[in-house]
Image (tube, rainbow, N blue to C red):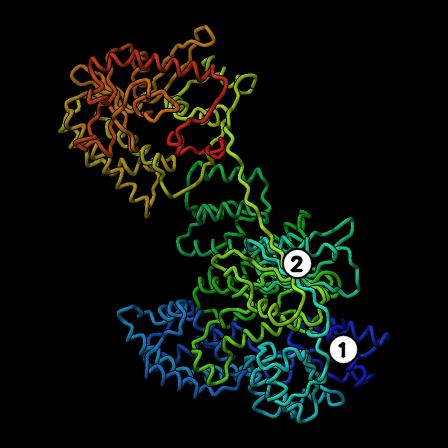
Amino acid sequence: MKPFLQEVAEDLIAKFGSQLQHCAIIFNNKRPSAYLQKHLADIIQKPFFSPSFFTIQEFFASATKYKIADFYLQFFTLHKIYNQLLVEEKLETISSHKFFPLAKIILSDFSQIDSDLVDAEKLYQDLEDISIINKDFDYLSPEQYEFLAQFWTSYSEGKHKKQQELFIKMWRRMPKLYHKFHETLKAQDYITNGQAYRLLAEGNINEQEFLKTFEKGKIVFVGFNALSSAEAKIFTQLQEAEKSLFYFDADEYYLADPLQEAGLFLRKNINQLGLKNVFENQVSLMKTAEHSVNVFKVQGQSAQAKILNHILIDDYEKTEELGSTVVVLADESLLIPTLQTIPTNYNGNDIDLNVTMGFALATSSIFGLADLWLNSQLEVLQNNVVSYKNVEAFITHPLSGLSQKMKDKIQTALLNENIVEIEHQRLLKQSGLFEVFYKKIDKPENVVTYLLGVLDYVLTRLSNAKTLKKIDAELFVKTIQELNRLHDTFGKHIGNEEISFVIYLVQKSLQAIAVPLAGDPLNGIQVMGLLETRNLNFDKVVILGFNEGIIPKSSIGNSFIPDSIRRVYGLPVLENLDAISSYMVYRLLQRAKDINFVYNSLTDESTSGEASRILKQLEFESGFDFKYNELNLDIKTEPFKEVKIEKVGNEFIQKALQVYLDKKKAISPSALTQYISNPIDFFFNYIAGIKEPKEVSAVVEANEIGSVLHKVMEYFYQDLRVAEITAERINERRKLVPGFIQKAFNFVMFKNPDKVHEYKGMQKVVLAIVDAYATIILDQDEKQTPFNIVSLEQKVEAEIAFPLNGKEASIKIFGYIDRVDVKDGVTKIIDYKTGSDKLTFKDIPSLFDSDGKHINKALIQTLLYTYAYEQFAGKTCVEPNLYIVKTMNDPTYGGVWFKSNRQLLKGDFLEEIKPEFLAELRKKLTELFEAPYFVASAIPDNYKYSIYKTLFGK
């Protein structure tokens, strides 16, 4: 079917011929001008002088003598005036940071008031009157309440009345703010877009000097639908002066039917305003042309894009001069999945793809680097430090250009020191990129300047190294352009602002940037948002994200003007969005042959899972040929497969085990208990050498609390061990415990016991926990006094023999004993525990049953220490004691001795148990070296906290 713009081109040439150059052609957006120029060239077939093309905003701005103020000039002006008004009312002024979210809403309301020619004085007076009468705030969203709470700083549930009074004062203040705001801008030769509309509408636009340029032609308005009051008045004036033409893209299907919301604004334009449509009485394409509609119901947001290859397969090889296929993203978050889905070539041929909506800078690595710099600067400003996570993000960032060797060197050093926050000066000493990146901002004017310096440095490095990608180059250029614009805008306004607020503004500005991707705007498959389709036509239309709540939208946006007042003054309301969305869809469909709607049927926080009501309406009324398709993504789970690691014939495993048999490496008690609990864990940890990645963290893990406590007790008894330990000596030394705790904490966390460190948050909590644990242990020790300490943190080694393949083999075991005491002639092994260990056990065989529920790791470890110490020191009757700090004082579960069936593991019972323990241990060692497989335990609790669960299929 013939596109709308081709029909416009044919009619314009027929009407104006060579005089077309004297016409101004006005669109709602920039996109259609390229298409209309193409159609004009195709029809004229020779060089010609082009008419002038404008968007409606550009045309109105050109018709005034003022410049259009950008958002930041408007914001700073508004903030200054608002604070002046507060001072006049003898109220406290507010900071830019608190005012910013409110300013965006106020400026939006001012713009709507102006473009719809509303009397601001009367509107705000009505709002004040209504607020006084009913004090009803129900129309405000939670976000707006939050803004108001920040704004007034006095909000709380108990101060609702106070808030209402402040709200009324705000309405009273608004007329003054509105007038002074516009007066101040005008004094600088600036106005807002809305004010430009008002000035032209309330004056006589026909007298504007700018319009004389087009006296020999006409001002041609193409494809307009919803008009503001100012536009309607200006259009009417131009028509009455016979200076304008209007080309409305309408279809009788929805124009003549008053129940069709798609024609709501066109009916108003034509019937009420009396604007004459050049294309009136045309045949209804919605009713007469063939339309094939495919509806695709898919499960999941990204899945909508993944179905494109199925829909577009026939379009990948098309090479028409003017692209006839469009992918419309009703939900613009689908851009990345769409680009990832459509291939760059098909069957050896390149696919022409043009993305008009632009690539969001916020999803790029360049924004990531800029945002990282801005956040790092905030940290430096606050405490002269940068968090490890931000330093790590910087050195691993793809644009940093650091070599892998340098990255590894820096990360290893920081991991070893476990530094959560790196001092700013230390980073500057690294010079080069670090010196540029971490240069501290000294004043607000330098935020943009320094960021430009960082980007320029990185860009130069990448260019010199010839590693700059084309897309990154385009993004760099756009980012630098935006920052230069901000620098020019900020220059006069930010001298007295907080640096943190300027950083916030720069972040917000960069987040809003969209960079057009390379492509032919006329050829190939076009990817665009719904608004960009205005005036354009395609034979094949694919709309992604056709869900209720997305199209039409379910919110009109933030505003302090309630719905009832909006209706009275003719300001946009929610139904307007419904009508606009319906029109854009219907207009796009009326000339399309092949129509494809794709929607997400899953319900989540962003979508209802329902198809748009527009789709339902079309199905019910249009008579189009509808076909429904459902994409079901079957979820398949892998059947459980037991993972066994075979030892026999595996040279790597056999070599690793032989190292232990050759006594080149000793086995620790914790390694043995890991094998007993879950044999396959032993393989991953000690044979394969797979370790949990080390991380820098300010949070102290449970095992580290135990390490700190062990070190505290070592420091405490280090000097006391030279003589008998008495209660008096313990009490006298207790006052040193806080210092020992800090020293131990610094040793465990930073490998530097003498480090000067300011403890924060959870670190203070950990110090308090260790203090409480140390007190429990010292209280227990007081009860045991007098006693002597033989050793602290002593390393012991011993050999243990066991049968292997019909012969005797042996291994070496080693460990560090927390403390060895002697009391009343009995040598005791003291082991501190901060976890949930238990003193009870069933019997010795159950300790070694990997598929049983009665493994007691603490008992196995302390008995191993006992055996090793007896071998090492040549002593007998050594007794294991366990200090479980969490339960030591419990009357039921407390004490320091292990017990089985209420019988304490000491004296004769202990000596009976020791040979049985050794026999079972030897069996387990035989299994470790002789069994054909490393397998997982049959009891899930035995590997509940294993880091290797995913590796063995659990």
Report the side of 129 relative to 529 (left or right). Answer: left
- The residue that appears at 67% across and 61% down in the rendered structure is 355
- Which residue is drawn at the image coordinates 72% and 63% (left, top)? 325
Q: Which mark is residue 474?
A: 2
For label 1, the residue is 7
Q: Residue furthest right?
A: 46
Type of amino acid under label 2: Glu
Say the numbered circle drawn on residue 355: none
- Which residue occupies 45% across, 36% down? 694
Position above or below: 807 against 527:
above
Residue 712 appears in which quarter of the rendering? top left
The vertical placement of 619 against 277, above or below, is above
* Discs 1/2, front: 1
Is 71 situated above or below 631? below
Which circle's residue, 1 or 2, is located before the other in the chain?
1
Residue 542 point in image, percent of width and height: 66, 62
Apparent side of residue 652 relative to residue 537 in the rendered image (left or right): left
Q: Residues within 10 Å of mark 1 (few under 14, many from 20)?
A: some
Nearer the observer, 265 or 152 = 265
